[in-house]
């Protein structure tokens, strides 16, 4: 939270303005810091960093992807913001899982009931695991989805998002971040210009976090698989 929180002016002027080859590793992101509370829970960093010119923003999904993101970022000339979680989180990728900065990857594709997928779920970071759990439960209800790992917020894989939004006809964004200005906002900006579609946002609302166990915070702030399922069903109704 203290980077970019405490160092924003230096990041903006000394690093980004000069397009300096600096990599910024920000941790204590989202609500996974738990008992450290609101002062140590970054829920606005994606929104802040993606507005800075020259800055790339990458949010790895797990430990394996974090390693890949670090290596790939080191090979890029220019500033990169890497968003890491502090707590131990599920590892659900493997070494062979594709990873390229700026390229989103499909992690789940369902044709439940023999129909085309009804909703595109786009997530980033460790909470993508909850999106996959939600997709699995929706499959049991004959609701088909595509889950897209959008680890790079900037530059956003606009072509992939537009392609899959057209295929599904509705979108749900999932992020451990404020719904204001983060991944969901970036996706909405793309869709409104290229393919307006019903969209729901799963993330923290216009609020700070608080001190509690991460699982309790996820429940209170609506970041559990059941909340993603609710958003999917809500956006399906808006298609009709």
Image (cartoon, rainbow, N blue to C red):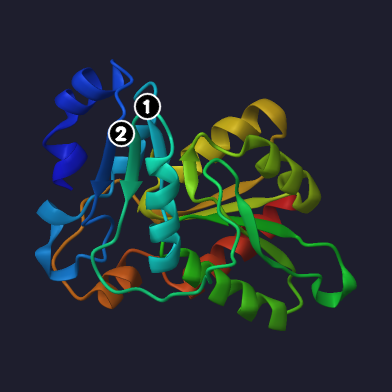
Q: Classify residue 112 as left or right of residue 159.
A: right
Q: Classify residue 41 as left or right of residue 97.
A: left
Q: Mark 1: give few (<14), some (14-19) or many (20+) Cα within 10 Å.
A: some
Judging depth in this view, the residue of 210 and 3 nearest the camera is 3
Element under disc 1: loop
Residue found 24% across the figure and 48% down from its top: 26
- In the image, which disc is placed on residue 48? 2
* Outermost residue to the right: 114
Label 1: which residue?
Answer: 51
Residue found 56% across the figure and 61% down from its top: 231
- Residue 3 in picture, x, y percent from top left: 18, 41
Question: In this rendering, is residue 33 above or below 47?
Answer: below
In the picture, residue 187 is in which quadrant? top right
- In the image, which disc is placed on residue 4? none
Do labels 1 and 2 touch, CB within 8 Å? yes
- Residue 76 in picture, x, y percent from top left: 43, 35
Residue found 75% across the figure and 70% down from its top: 110
Question: In this rendering, is residue 184 above or below 13?
Answer: below
Q: Classify residue 210 as left or right of residue 101.
A: left
Residue 197 visible? The answer is: no
Judging depth in this view, the residue of 143 and 40 nearest the camera is 40
- Residue 34 in picture, x, y percent from top left: 19, 68
* Outermost residue to the bottom: 140
Q: Classify residue 237 as left or right of residue 218.
A: right
């Amino acid at each position: 939270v203290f980077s970019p929180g405490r160092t924003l002016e230096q990041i903006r002027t000394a690093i980004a303005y000069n397009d300096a080859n600096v990599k910024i590793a920000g941790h204590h992101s989202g609500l996974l810091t738990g008992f450290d509370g609101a002062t140590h829970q970054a829920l606005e960093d994606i929104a802040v960093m993606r507005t800075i010119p020259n800055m790339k923003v990458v949010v790895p999904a797990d430990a394996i992807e974090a390693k890949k993101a670090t290596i790939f970022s080191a090979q890029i000339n220019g500033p990169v913001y890497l968003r890491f979680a502090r707590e131990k989180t599920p590892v659900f990728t493997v070494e062979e899982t594709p990873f390229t900065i700026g390229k989103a990857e499909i992690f789940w594709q369902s044709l439940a009931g023999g129909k085309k997928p009804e909703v595109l779920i786009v997530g980033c970071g460790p909470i993508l695991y909850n999106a996959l759990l939600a997709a699995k439960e929706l499959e049991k209800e004959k609701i088909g989805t595509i889950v897209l790992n959008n680890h790079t917020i900037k530059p956003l894989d606009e072509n992939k998002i537009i392609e899959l939004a057209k295929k599904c006809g509705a979108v749900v964004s999932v992020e451990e971040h404020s719904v204001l200005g983060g991944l969901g906002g970036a996706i909405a900006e793309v869709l409104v210009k290229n393919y307006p579609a019903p969209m729901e946002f799963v993330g923290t609302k216009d609020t700070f976090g608080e001190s509690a166990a991460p699982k309790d915070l996820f429940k209170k702030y609506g970041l559990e698989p059941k909340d993603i399922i609710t958003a999917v069903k809500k956006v399906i109704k808006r298609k009709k």
